[in-house]
Image: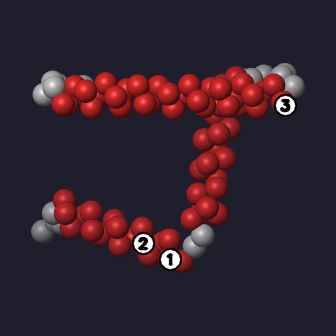
Amino acid sequence: MGLTPAERTLRAKLAAHTLHAQVDSRVHTEPARTAFLARFDKQVDPTGQLDPGERTRRAEQARRAYFAGLALRSSKIRRARKAGGDVA
């Protein structure tokens, strides 16, 4: 017999708490953060020809645009849910 959704959630929480009790979370997630931020560098300067300062400035703007887009989509979904509409 499988686990219920609530039991799976509890098992996942147990695993997460156990992991974070044993390792420094910042160190553990550093490779993922680095890869995530590098995607914006590659997006704004795929050939690597920009001055490093300009690439950093543009990558920061691309990152901000990415998160602004997420916020806009989230807002639309919340509004649709509040109105009882179909969220697709």
Residue 7 drawn at (x, y percent): 21, 67
Q: Quadrant of the C terminus?
A: top left
Asked which secondary structure carries label 3, the reply is helix
Q: Amino acid at mark 3?
A: Pro
In the rendered image, the vertical position of residue 87 relative to residue 1, given as above or below:
above
3D distance between C-alphas at marks 1 and 3: 38 Å
Residue 67 drawn at (x, y percent): 51, 32
Q: Which residue is disc 1 drawn over?
A: 21
Mark 1 or mark 3: whose residue is earlier in sequence: 1
Query: Is 56 situated left or right of 70 in this image?
Result: right
The answer to whether residue 83 is seen in the rendering is: yes
**In front: 44, or 69?**
69
**Disc 1 residue crowd, few under 14, some 14–19, many 20+, Cα 10 Å:** few
Query: Which labelled disc corresponds to residue 52?
Result: 3
Q: Quadrant of residue 35?
A: top right
Q: Which residue is disc 2 drawn over?
A: 17
